Image (cartoon, grey):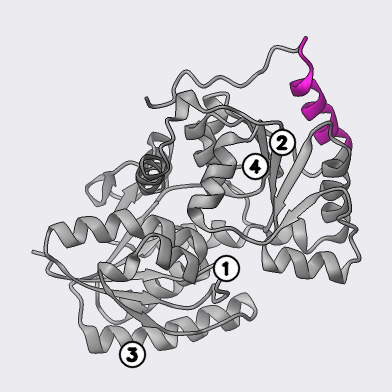
Amino acid sequence: MVERVCLVVGARPNFVKAYPLLRAFSEEEMEVSLVNTGQHYDAELCEVFFDELRIRDFVREINLKVGSGSHAEQTSRCIIQMERVLQREKPDVTVVIGDVNSTLAGALASIKTGIPVAHVEAGYRSFDLGMPEEVNRILVDHISQLLFSPTESSTMNLMIEGIPEDRIRFSGNVLIDSLVSVCENLGITPKNIDKEDYAVLTIHRPKNVDDPNRLREIVDAAKEIPIRVVFPIHPRTRERCAEFRVDLEGIEVRYPMGYMEFISLLARAKLVLTDSGGIQEEALFLGTPCLTLRENTERIETLISGGNLLVGANRERIIRVVSELSSPETVSPFIHSTLPS
C-alpha cells in the first residue's frame, strides 16, 4: 500500500504533467511531497504554471533551486539534494515524469536510497542518442520498478528492451489529461475551433538553438513562409539568437506564455512549427497541423495519425511544405479523424 509519495518536477513540461497526478493523489488522500528541483527557475517558465494550475493548492513544495549549468553539473546537484530530501521524507515511492535532467536525478537518488521509482511517460524513444532526453529516458526506464507508458508504441519499446511485462502499465497520456482540463476552462472544443491566419513557432532543443546554422535556417524559413509567424521565445533561445546575431525582424516575437495563453494560441493557429515533443501531441489533439523541426520524433503516433510531418531544419524544405499546405489547390496531408470529441 502506497501512502507517501515524492513527486519530482523541475522543468516546464513536468509542471503541466504533474497537475493530473496531484489531483489524483489528492483524491486518494495520499501524503505527497512535491520536489521542484528548480531546473527551470525563470518566473515565465515556472511560477506562471504553478499559479495557473494552482499546484500549491494540492501540495507543499520543496524547491531545491539547482539552477542552470552543464548536464553533469545540473544532474549532480539534483542528485545530492534529492538524496537529502528522500532521507528526510521517507516516501514509499518516488514518481518521476518525462525525460529532463531532473527526471534522471530523481530516479538515481531514489534507487540509491532504496526507494522504488515509478516513471510516468515511460517508453518514448526517438532512437537518437544524440538527444540528452533520449539518454535520460532509457536510463530511467531501466532502473524504475513501475513504468507508466502513454502509448501502445511506448509499451512495445519497453517490452522489446526486455523490461518485464508485470512492471509496465499502459496508463494513457497525462499531458492530454491536463490539456482536456484547460480546454474545458477555456471553452475550447477541439473539433470546433475557428482557425486564424498565423503559424506558431517554438524552438528550444540544443541541436537547433546551439547550432548557429540550424538556428538561422529555421528563423530564415519562418521569415519567408507565406503566413504570419508568432514566436513565443524560450529564454535560452533568445540568448542564442543574441549571441549568434540572428535577426528576428519580420517575426512576431513574444515572451514565453503561460500554459492557458499558449494553448489558446496553439488551438487557433493554422499550423505550428516546433521541436517540442509535447506540442506535437497537443497540436494533434487541437487539430493544428504540426511541422516538427527535427529528423526524428518519439511521438510516433502523431506521424501515424497524419497530424505531424518531420521537416528537419532545412530552410527550403520548410518553406516548400508550408507553401504547399497554404495552397488552396493542395489537399492537406493532415488527417484528424482520430481526434477525441
Residue at 76% x, 60% y is: 209
Q: Residue 198 shows which numbered tag? A: 2
**Disc 3: which residue:** 84
Residue depth check, mark 1 versus mark 4: number of the one nearer the observer: 1
Q: Residue extending furthest left?
A: 1
Residue at 28% x, 48% y is: 168
What type is the residue that disc 3 sits on? Answer: Arg
Residue at 74% x, 36% y is: 311
Q: Neighbour class for label 3 at 10 Å: few (<14), some, many (≥20)?
A: few
State the CA–CA distance, disc 4 to disc 3: 38 Å
Residue depth check, mark 4 versus mark 2: number of the one nearer the observer: 2
Segment tinted magenta in the rendering:
316-329
**Disc 4: which residue:** 296
Kindly check if marks 4 and 2 are in contact, taking CB atoms under 8 A apart as contact.
Answer: no
State the CA–CA distance, disc 1 to disc 3: 28 Å
Q: Residue 44 shows which numbered tag? A: 1
Q: Neighbour class for label 4 at 10 Å: few (<14), some, many (≥20)?
A: some
